[in-house]
Amino acid sequence: MTRNLKLFIGATIIFYFIGGVNDARAMYVLAGASLAVILGCYVLSRLAVSGLDLQVSLSRRRGTAGTRIPVKLQLANLRGVTRPTPTVTLEIANATVAGVDRPYRYVLPNLDGRATQEIDVTVDCPARGRYRINHLAVEGTDPIGMFRRPRRFPAHEDFVALPKVFSAPGIAAWELLSPEGRRVARGRRRDAGDFGGIREYAPGDDLRYVHWKATAHTGRLAIKEFEQRQEAQIAVWLDLSAAGVVGKGVGASTEIAVSVAASLLQTFIMADYTVQLIGEGLSPSLGLASRGEAYLSRALQALADVQAGGASPFSAMVMEQVRSAGRAHAIFVITTGAGGGVPDALAFCGVHGILPTVFVIDPAGANDVAEPVAARCRSIGLQTVVVTEMDGIATALRQAASLTEGQLVV
């Protein structure tokens, strides 16, 4: 109920009461006039939204979390009556991440009879996920703003926001590998591609690729680099168990974990590595070793839609994957460790000669087990980085590339 409506209703009651007490006919007339104004405004408010048609269209249906999506609104007046300042309202609802729905309200200029008006607006994508335009309506009013009458239209037009992807400029993909993974990668380099440069020799390098002129000039062994990439396989194991979730909504650990996974995948795919993404609730096809931008597109789409809710503990998935992972794999584990048993499962990796790099997710320091899990991972010889915020992912990648021992908090 608007303020003006309350005033007119109050005036009508007061006029009628005074007329009844004092037997004043004039007061009855004023009460009737006030009531007539209310009824007239009610009718005009209904006419203000009748005969209107609202269409919504999107120029693109995929965006990225943290950006804005352009939306075109087209409002048509199908009748010959001018509509004063119609207002379009809508809500952007996220079906994947809770707590990020946002309402929007756009006040348009007067719309002449038989006219059509188009406006271009943008809506926020505060988090990854599948969005939908809900509660689409045109709101009209009477000349004195007594009633606000909405006319609702069916919800339609959905779009997807992909997870944020971070990169660490100046860091080569192979630098993110564990020492064992680096040795495998170097051992599988081939000289069939274009010459890429010279670097210092590291243990495990194939002596066939020694650059003898540079070695003679510097007195230290130098190795030739080639653009052709190795066949070493990169595996990303993502904790999507319900027990492993810390926090809620856009601040949940799942959001940071998904962006870490997306960033790793993009880093290695852009460097032409073979990759695979494994997590409960993800398509099994993503667990098949693949490469190229088509796989990256599928993986990012899956990461945009996925929700943490797996019933099985992440530690069980790790134990299962270890049995099928070979020494040639460079494995990245992304977990909060909150589900329990994760350090023991990762220790089992070491028994099989696998030393994964571990990203422990601790959103805003809310994960009570993050520090103990990270300390245990360090004690069994695993490279470990603790990530506490979304904007720290680039720093986490950079530090993981240079990590030799100890625990890092980003």
Image: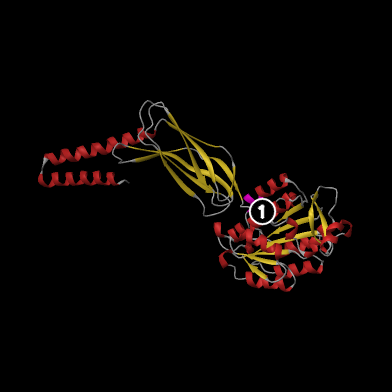
Colouring scheme applied when the structure was drawn: secondary structure
Asked whether 217 or 227 is in front, the reply is 217
Q: Is residue 68 left or right of residue 48?
A: right
Q: Is residue 318 above or below residue 161?
A: below
Residue 234 visible in this rendered orientation of the protein:
yes
Secondary structure under the numbered disc 1 in the rendered image: helix
What x and y, as percent, mark residue 156?
53, 39
The residue located at (56%, 49%) in the rendering is: 95
Q: Residue furthest right?
A: 208
Helix, strand or loop for the magenta stretch, by majority: helix
Quadrant position of the C terminus in the picture: bottom right
Residue 314 visible in this rendered orientation of the protein:
no
Residue range of the region highlighted in magenta in the rendering: 302-306
- Counting every numbered tag in the picture gives 1
The residue located at (16%, 40%) in the rendering is: 28
Q: Is residue 327 left or right of residue 399?
A: right
Residue underneath mark 1: 262
Q: Is residue 206 left or right of residue 396?
A: right
What x and y, as percent, mark residue 216?
86, 61
What x and y, as percent, mark residue 86?
39, 37
State yes or no: residue 145 in magenta: no
The residue located at (35%, 29%) in the rendering is: 82
What x and y, as percent, mark residue 318?
74, 63
Q: Quadrant of residue 224?
A: bottom right
Q: Is residue 198 above or below residue 20?
A: below
Q: 10 Å neighbourhood of mark 1: few (<14), some, or many (≥20)?
A: many
Residue type (three-letter) at the residue carrying disc 1: Ala
